[in-house]
């Protein structure tokens, strides 16, 4: 009965407009207050202990690295490189938009950082070149979801922490789905470019192309450094995030000279603000997870799946539907902490590995970042483009279909996520 009341309290708080993290905290306090022989201080203890993780230290480090990349002109270097490769194709700036998001995803681990950093460069540039505002915003917003699919990925770091599975396996598993989604988005661009006769850039001569590529080498080394360190077993995800911060600082202050000492205060403040939002949501989700554990929700879930869903495909499709729903009003990290541990037991009983489940959850939640009403990337991208969120969402729909197709394929064919495993 108390579990039902807690759910009602949570829904009422959301309908009142209370931020998700505060709603989760209030619900945890309400529910635990009625658990016999448990003090409310448990909520605070769980919030603090839930963040006491070396793995989770990667979250603020990746946010800092992304901010340094954006301020340090590294994003622009990547844009120039991608335009040099595909700018001469009809609709080339759209292709470059997706390609640069795939490269930037190998640095930031965050879709919001991609939307902000790449969007501020490419959305105005595409509109100025004659692309419809909807296309410029749609492809930028949609391709930014690759930031949490192609490694490194902050949601994968969080999932690894709660599921106790290999972060390297998750990172490797995200490569092929990320490439498939990026390739599918380029197909949408190709269709639109042919249909609407989008512009193209003049083809660069060999000397100029080589000059652009050489100038981009310092920026392009960044994802190689991060992924090579983790996948090669030389560094943990947290250590690679720290190395990325140091390398981005060296590039910004020493090579490109676009970051000054005076800029560091603003960069650190912005990093702390973004990080505080993420980690507070994680902390409250840990407290809610404790409440769910007190009410033994995982046993009820396992009983339900054992008795009513004994097919792994149906289970995975239900997981996709659940996280599509959660993604419309909840950030990825709390959604993972609250529900992934509950689903893990049922998944393993059906022969589904923790890595496959994690990949499906992360990709599905990536879609949630571009779906209203909570889609953070959708809100950010539409604000940059200066257009209503509803109009931006309509432009994103074809790209969402690509991501959905890939995540369903991953549910049917887990080999897609284990090519490099």
Image (cartoon, rainbow, N blue to C red):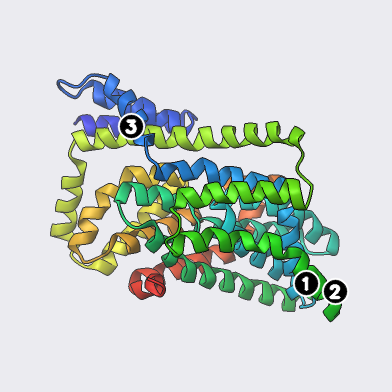
Where in the figure is residue 52, as x and y percent of width and height? 37, 35
Residue 93 in percent (x, y) is at 75, 67
Which residue carries the number 3 mark?
Answer: 49
Residue 80 in percent (x, y) is at 77, 64
Mark 1, Cα crowd under 10 Å, few <14 / some 14-19 / many 20+, is many
Please say if the residues under marks 1 and 2 sit with CB atoms less than 8 Å apart.
yes
Q: Does residue 245 appear left or right of residue 208 in this picture?
A: left
- The residue nearer to you, when weighing 186 against 214, is 214
In this rendering, position of residue 382 left or right of residue 298? right
Per the image, label 2 sits on a secondary structure element best described as helix
Of badges 1 and 2, the one in the foreground is 2
Q: Does 264 sit above or below residue 225?
A: above
Q: Position of residue 110 (x, y in %)?
A: 55, 50
The answer to whether one can see residue 166 in this image is yes
Counting residues from the start of the chain, the first of labels 1 and 2 encountered is 1
Tell me which residue sits at (75%, 70%) in the image.
Answer: 213
Placement of the N terminus among the 4 image quadrants:
top left
Q: Which mark is residue 84?
A: 1
Horizontally, residue 307 falls left or right of residue 46, namely left
Total of numbered circles in the picture?
Answer: 3
Marks 3 and 1, how far apart at CA: 48 Å
For the C terminus, the image quarter is bottom left
Which residue is at the front of the view, 199 or 212? Answer: 212
User: Label 2 belongs to which residue?
Assistant: 208
């Amino acid at each position: 009965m108390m579990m039902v009341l807690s759910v009602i309290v949570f829904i009422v708080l959301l309908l009142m407009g209370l931020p998700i993290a505060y709603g989760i905290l209030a619900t945890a306090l309400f529910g635990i207050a009625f658990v016999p022989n448990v003090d409310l201080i448990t909520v605070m203890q769980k919030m603090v202990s839930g963040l006491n993780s070396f793995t989770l230290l990667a979250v603020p480090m990746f946010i800092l690295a992304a901010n340094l990349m954006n301020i340090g002109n590294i994003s622009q270097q990547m844009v120039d490189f991608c335009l040099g490769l595909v700018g001469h194709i009809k609709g080339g700036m759209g292709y470059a938009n997706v390609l640069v998001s795939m490269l930037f995803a190998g640095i930031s681990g965050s879709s919001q950082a991609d939307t902000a950093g790449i969007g501020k460069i490419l959305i105005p540039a595409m509109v100025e070149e004659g692309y419809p505002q909807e296309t410029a915003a749609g492809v930028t917003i949609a391709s930014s979801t690759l930031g949490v699919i192609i490694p490194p990925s902050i949601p994968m770091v969080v999932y690894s922490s709660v599921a106790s599975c290999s972060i390297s396996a998750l990172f490797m598993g995200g490569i092929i789905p990320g490439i498939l989604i990026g390739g599918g988005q380029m197909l949408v661009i190709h269709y639109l470019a042919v249909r609407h006769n989008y512009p193209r850039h003049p083809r660069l001569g060999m000397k100029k192309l080589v000059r652009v590529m050489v100038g981009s080498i310092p920026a392009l080394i960044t994802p190689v450094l991060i992924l090579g360190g983790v996948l090669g077993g030389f560094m943990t995800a947290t250590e690679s995030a720290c190395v990325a911060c140091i390398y981005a600082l060296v590039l910004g202050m020493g090579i490109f000279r676009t970051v000054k000492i005076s800029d560091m205060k603003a960069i650190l403040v912005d990093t702390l603000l973004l990080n505080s939002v993420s980690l507070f949501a994680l902390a409250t989700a840990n407290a809610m997870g404790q409440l769910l554990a007190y009410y033994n929700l995982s046993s009820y879930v396992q009983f339900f799946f054992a008795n009513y869903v004994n097919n792994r495909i149906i289970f995975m499709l239900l997981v996709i539907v659940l996280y599509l729903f959660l993604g419309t009003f909840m950030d990825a990290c709390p959604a993972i902490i609250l529900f992934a541990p509950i689903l893990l037991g049922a998944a393993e009983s059906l022969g589904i590995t923790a890595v496959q489940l994690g990949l499906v959850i992360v990709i599905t939640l990536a879609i949630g970042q571009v779906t209203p009403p909570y889609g953070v990337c959708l809100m950010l991208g539409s604000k940059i483009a200066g257009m209503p969120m509803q109009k931006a969402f309509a432009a994103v729909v074809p790209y969402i279909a690509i991501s959905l197709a890939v995540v369903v394929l991953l549910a049917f064919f887990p080999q897609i996520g284990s090519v490099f495993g």
